[in-house]
Image (tube, grey):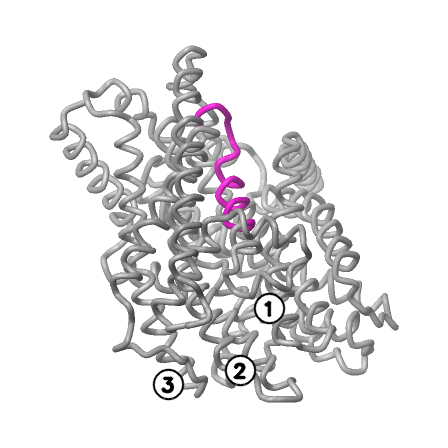
Amino acid sequence: MAIGTVLRTIKQAIWLGWKVETNWADPLIFAIYYLIRPLAGLLIVGFIFVVSSVVATAPLDPSYFAFMFVGNGFFIYVSQIMMSMSMLIHDDRAHYEVLKHIYLSPGSLAWYIFGRALNGVMNASVSLLLTFGFGVLIFQGLLGVQIPIDWFGINFPVLALSLVLGIVCFIAMGFMLCAINIMTSRVQFMLSEYVSGILYLFGGVVFHPEILPSWGQAISNALPITYFLRIVRFALLGQTSITVELNLLYLILTMMATIAVGVISFKIAMYKARKDGLIDKKEEY
Amino acid sequence: MREQLVHDLRAAYARLWVRIKGGNREPEWLIAEMIIPVLTLSAYIYIYKMLKAPPEFAGFVIIGGTMVAFWTNVLWNMSAQFYWEKETGTLEVYFVAPISRMAILFGMALGGFVNTTLRAITVLLAGILIFQVPLTLNEPLTALLLFFLTIIALYALGMLFASLFLMYGREAWHTANLLQEPVHFLSGSYFPYTYLPFLVQLLSSMIPLTFGLDGIRRVIIMGQGIGSVWPNIVALVIFILILLPLAKFALSYMENLGKKEGRLTLRWQ
């Protein structure tokens, strides 16, 4: 397919995704909406730290808070991408009944889905910035919890690299969800919750995976998010105990495996969907 | 009068039956609704473990995670239900039937309660068994009283929201989404709400789940009795007395407004 067509498909998909996500509210309400949920998630985790500090017999290390703050903040990418990609096939096929038209258009459905995922990435980035801003204001400004992040010493090249690799990885996982959704009905709500729940528990998001049982640590070591968050923390917190090169290598390896599974499962699902007539399958709407 | 009551009870039973049948016909839904909450609450328990908090905090999380299942059900299967019905084209059928709208909501609430209780018990047992949480239950009847009052108050709130969501399209979906984590935070689902700043506690006190959770935790985890949780009981009764009539009024008001604006059958908003 010509590069121009691919780029046009991605651009239109981003634009469409933006409209679908935003045009139900005016910009201020939309911004509040995109701030409140992730901020509330951060407040839950932050207050667990505050409560634990109060009941602890010895002062807690503020680096724990930074660990949770960064992990929970960057988890927005996972939840946002999984949510938008998990609902996409259901919405376009059963709810708005446009999937068949997109399938018939000159652009590829895969690039359209990729574009919609990029829209999720954009929304997640806005959420992340807002959540970090308000999170620092609330915890450091109002509650006096020290967040040991040197805002002027952030390693931006490493952060950018980890973000690109991590986001590609999460989008590949999203393609797996799309593949499952094309083949099935009425599982779209639970799929994103399953993936987010597993990654949140085993991915070293809000606690060190070392405290998991050994089988849990094995799962954690197989997940790209574990390495993604380690590198992000290295870039933001300057944690010298982390070997960034090794974690980058693991992130790239797990990313390649995820992409391979994502692409293959999506191709198989599309082949079977065409064969079994599932592309315009109607559900309850 | 008697005939109308019989009609309404039949409608409530029919809606209850559909809710129970629909909620349990897909085994993958059933399994997901039992496993996913355990994943989330496990993560929070591990945070407490990492921070070396006392073991009763794991119990707080498990009770919170269990009650959150009911809140989720209230949000998606009560509040947003009329939105789904509108999208699938069944809302108008309810409205032309010679029955009370409250009977429909009552049936949905009962069915939702039965379904969610099955899942919540699993979450509770899994949490207690996996994390070996110490329980000190001295007054089981007080715990049950608190639980049922909390459930009635929550579903009454769900009925009120259902009327508000009646008119809306995607706003309803997003509002239900918006009322998840913020309510988990404000109600202290994963930590005692008493650690929140005073002004935030004032906000928390507008949510029945806050009083229910606090009372149930005191009775089940800390071994307290009715002598210390009676303010929670009073607060929940007040919520019920306010929310149920308010829901009935709001439903009738929004239905009339919806008819005037022609939005009751409007899809894909």
Q: Amino acid at mark 1?
A: Ile
Q: Secondary structure at mark 2?
A: loop
Q: Can you tell which quarter of the image residue A235 is in?
A: bottom left
Gap in Å between the C-alphas at discs 3 and 2? 18 Å
Residue A61: mark = 2
**Which of the image's four quarters has the N terminus of chain B?**
top right
x 44%, y 27%: residue: A265
Q: Chain of mark 1?
A: B
Name the chain letter of the residue that bears numbered label 3: A
Q: Is residue A238 shown left or right of residue B104? A: left
The magenta stretch is A182-198
Mark 3: which amino acid? Gly
Give the Cα distance between marks 1 and 2.
Answer: 13 Å
- Secondary structure of the residue carrying tag 1 is helix
Image position, residue A270 (x, y; %): 39, 20
The amino acid sitting under disc 2 is Asp
Q: Secondary structure at mark 3?
A: helix
Residue A282: image location, x then y, percent: 43, 21
Q: Check residue A187 for magenta coloring.
A: yes
Mark 1 — residue?
B47
Q: Nearer the viewer, mark 3 or mark 2?
A: 2
Is A224 covered by the magenta stretch?
A: no
- How would you rate the neighbour count of disc 2 (Cα within 10 Å): few for under 14, some for 14-19, many for 20 or more? few
Q: Which mark is residue A233?
A: none
Q: Looking at the picture, tell me which residue is in the foreground, A77 or B265.
A: A77
